[in-house]
Amino acid sequence: MGSTSAVRRLKKMRREHYPDFLFLLETKNSSDHVMGVKDWMGYDKVHIVDPVGLSGGLALFWKDLYRVEILQSDARLIDTRISQGTRVFYITFVYGDPVRHLREEVWERLTRIGLQRDDPWMLTGDFNEIMDNSEKLGGPRRPESSFYPFRTMARNSRVKEIPSCGNKLSWGGRRDSVWVQCRLDRSFGNSGWFNLFPRVITEYLDLLGSDHRPIITRLVGANNTYRGRFIFDKRWIDKPETMKIIREQWSREGDSQGKSVLNGLTRCRKALSRWKRTHVTNSETQIQLLRRDLEEEATKVHPNFQK
């Protein structure tokens, strides 16, 4: 989480989505560092599971809109009871064990939780497992029996897949010199969850600076895009449109003398913000093109690693 690419991903998530809850895996950093992330990301609360040495570590951030009770927490899951007014629901944030023969211990714990939970409940995170070979591209086929424990957990926990959109092959990496893609990240809900949030949907976002795609689960399909503070881009100075906008807004009449400077600055900021949204800069265009190329290359069966 301390790398430049990780910081870039978090800033992109903050700018474009700013979810009410943010679950980070493999933080690999001290609590002090994670607390710093909470502050510059703008979240009110955080629950941290410290890494062991230089591996692992979980962090759950949330806004003060919710009252969150941590029911149990360790390196594999954070189980929560969440209330907002009179509405109460449960979310279990999961990190499936990277070691396959240890993963069934996580499934057993989730099953015990599910059997006792009739209230609205969602599971989300990196399960480090797939349901069948259709959720895998590249590498040898796995035997059907290897999927039984994960399927059994979902069935016995009485949960089903939350509808999703985007590229569901959420992880990509090389295994024995072969490029493999799998659907490791996902969200489930029980019947109470779908009754409470009938329009819930999970979206798989772009692969950017990581071997995992972020996923975002929208409860009611609302657009929670964060609008950050206005920052003047010095590259605008040489654009004739910029000077025209500033002159037009600054010369507008109707302000009292005591408020003319403040109101003039406010008008300029708003006008420049509107102009920016409708006039994409060259750098933004280049970034979008590079992201598109990266996405296309990462989803190929045989990507070119020399690019």
Image (cartoon, rainbow, N blue to C red):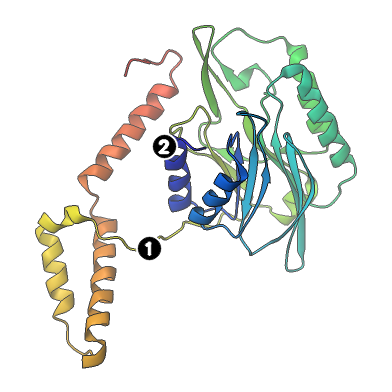
Do callouts 1 and 2 mark residues in contact (Cβ within 8 Å)?
Answer: no
Residue positioned most to the right? 116
Question: Distance between the Cα atoms at labels 1 and 2?
Answer: 22 Å
With respect to residue 5, does 12 lie above or below?
below
Image quarter hosting the C terminus: top left
Helix, strand or loop at mark 1? loop
Residue at 47%, 56% in the rendered image: 225
Q: Is residue 20 left or right of residue 239?
A: right
Say which quarter of the image contains residue 289: top left
Pinpoint residue 165: horizontal percent, then vertical percent.
54, 38
Q: Is residue 105 left or right of residue 167?
A: right
Amino acid at pointer 1: Arg
Q: Is residue 273 left or right of residue 6?
A: left
Judge the density around disc 1: few (<14), some (14-19), many (≥20) Cα neighbours within 10 Å: few
Q: Foreground: 151 or 73?
A: 73
Pinpoint residue 273: horizontal percent, then vertical percent.
28, 63
Residue at 78%, 13% in the rendered image: 145
Pinpoint residue 305: horizontal percent, then vertical percent.
38, 16
With respect to residue 228, does 146 lie above or below?
above
Q: Residue tagged by mark 1?
A: 229
Residue at 9%, 60% in the rendered image: 240
Nearer the observer: mark 1 or 2; the answer is 2
Q: Residue tagged by mark 2?
A: 4
Pinpoint residue 187: horizontal percent, then vertical percent.
67, 39
Amino acid at pointer 2: Thr
Residue at 16%, 70% in the rendered image: 246
Q: Earlier in the sequence, mark 1 or mark 2?
A: 2
